[in-house]
């Protein structure tokens, strides 16, 4: 069974940092895009960042570019999202997701998800 275990959320003041982890199992890590979406109350789910572990390609939403960094540890089948300079508008449930690698347009358009993990809450206070 595919499992995506997210962790690392919490409460932080504006300007602070958090690191999220997504531990994946049940599929061949290198064949998948793995990344993060977020959903704030009353808002639609949005793509945040993703990575193709076999070649290191990364994608970011414009709202997080320059502040968030995604990376992968292929030996541990784990993807990390380092979030710096956090803002109150980053407050949301962050969900780990995985999908088979497809066309770049699908990846950039955030339409690649086959599996969802449970979310982790990130709260940024002003």
Image (cartoon, rainbow, N blue to C red):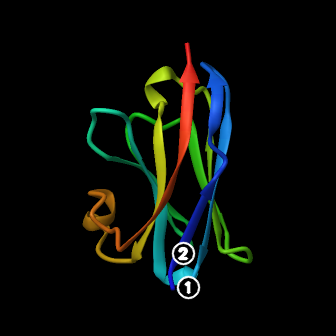
* Location of residue 83 in the rendering, given as x and y in whole percent from the top left corner: 60, 38
Verify CB contact (< 8 Å) between mark 2 and mark 1.
Answer: yes
State left or right for residue 62 relative to residue 74. Answer: left
The residue drawn where x is 55% and y is 81% is 30
Q: Nearer the viewer, residue 11 or 66?
A: 11
The residue drawn where x is 29% and y is 74% is 103
Mark 1 burial class by Cα count in 10 Å: few <14, some 14-19, many 20+: few
The numbered mark at residue 3 is 2
Q: CA distance from mark 2 to mark 1?
A: 6 Å
* Location of residue 32 in the rendering, given as x and y in whole percent from the top left corner: 47, 77
Q: Image height check: is 65 above or below 29?
A: above
The residue drawn where x is 25% and y is 64% is 105
* Location of residue 31 in the rendering, given as x and y in whole percent from the top left corner: 48, 83
The numbered mark at residue 104 is none
Q: In this figure, which residue is indicated by the disc labeled 1? A: 26
Mark 2 burial class by Cα count in 10 Å: few <14, some 14-19, many 20+: some
Helix, strand, or loop for circle 1? loop
Q: Image height check: is 42 above or below 61?
A: above
């Amino acid at each position: 069974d595919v499992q995506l275990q997210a962790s690392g959320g919490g409460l932080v003041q504006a300007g602070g940092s958090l690191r999220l982890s997504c531990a994946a199992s049940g599929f061949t890590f290198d064949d998948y895009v793995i990344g993060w979406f977020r959903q704030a109350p009353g808002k639609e789910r949005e793509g945040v960042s993703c990575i193709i572990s076999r070649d290191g390609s990364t994608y970011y939403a414009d709202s997080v570019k320059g502040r968030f960094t995604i990376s992968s540890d292929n030996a541990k089948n784990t993807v990390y999202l380092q979030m710096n300079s956090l803002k109150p508008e980053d407050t949301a449930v962050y969900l780990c997701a995985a999908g088979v690698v497809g066309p770049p347009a699908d990846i950039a358009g955030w339409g690649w998800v086959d599996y969802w993990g449970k979310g982790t809450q990130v709260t940024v206070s002003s």
